[in-house]
Image: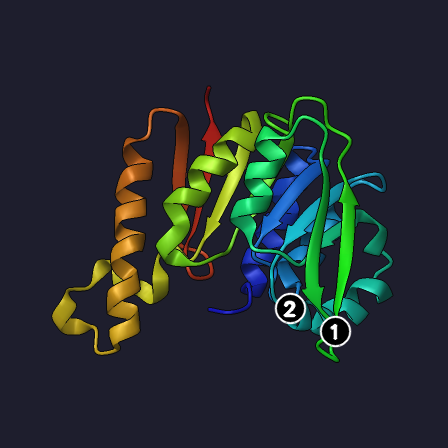
Amino acid sequence: MMNVAADEGQFLSVLLKIINGKKTMGIGVFTGYSLLTTALALPEDGKIVAIDPDKEAYEVGLPFIKKAGIEHKINYIPSDAFPLLNDLIYCVSAVLTYAINDQSSRKHTSSCNFHCLHGEEDTFDFIYVDASENDCLKFHELALKLVKIGRIIADDNTLFLGSVAKSDKEIMEEPIRKLRNFVIEFNRFITADPRVESSLLSIGDGLTLCRRLY
């Protein structure tokens, strides 16, 4: 699923209010529906670091974000996630600059300042991951370093169109058959990971909540 389901968006909104989330991150933004629901649920001084290399897709939803009056809560960074996440974790004094392509294919830069002294480890209340299935375990490890103890990581698409409960013979589409193995591996790993308390919810395309224990 490319967009977050409406019921999942409503659930995330309520969850953020319950945990009083203030500093959050979205890894994988697409057209920004999950970003919109998150920002609306945050207090006026809440912030979201939103990471997605597809700036064109993000701009599809940007008019709705502006209309909702929550653009000031969002720090959108058009970048691949892995180098940025590592910079956030290991930086000594981060001033991150990323080269991006504008619509006329000319290069320009987008700068974001985090002003951290020892990185951004253990500082996020909530991290939402909706990125490539073949990298979900890598994102889990990085997100665990960034989220506070007792706070939440939410991984989307963990039922992966129901394919995780089917045999190879029942799945006709080759891309789904290939990627679902990564999701199965992720689900098995999470259930055995002593660092988190987890629950897989049958909402949307499957949403796994991981509460960091230590």
What is the number of the mark on residue 106?
1
Q: Quadrant of residue 55?
A: bottom right
When the figure is inspected, residue 213 is found, relative to residue 101, above or below; the finding is above
Who's the residue at 12% across and 72% down the image? Answer: 169
Of the residues shown, which amino acid type is indicated by label 1? Arg
Residue 58 visible from this viewpoint = yes
Who's the residue at 60% across and 45% down the image? Answer: 84
Q: Write down the residue under mark 2.
A: 31
Whole-percent x, y for residue 76 in the image: 72, 54
Q: Determine whether, in the image, residue 101 is placed left or right of residue 86.
A: right
When the figure is inspected, residue 184 is found, relative to residue 166, above or below; the finding is above
Q: Nearer the N terminus, badge 2 or badge 1?
A: 2
Q: Quadrant of residue 149?
A: top right
Q: CA distance from mark 2 to mark 1?
A: 23 Å
Name the residue furthest top.
Answer: 214
Of the residues shown, which amino acid type is indicated by label 2? Thr
Q: Determine whether, in the image, residue 200 is placed left or right of residue 5.
A: left
Q: Quadrant of residue 198?
A: top left
Residue 70 visible from this viewpoint = no
Q: Determine whether, in the image, residue 136 is placed left or right of residue 20.
A: left
How many neighbours does mark 2 have within 10 angstroms: few (below 14), some (14-19), or many (20 or more)? many
Name the residue furthest front.
Answer: 107
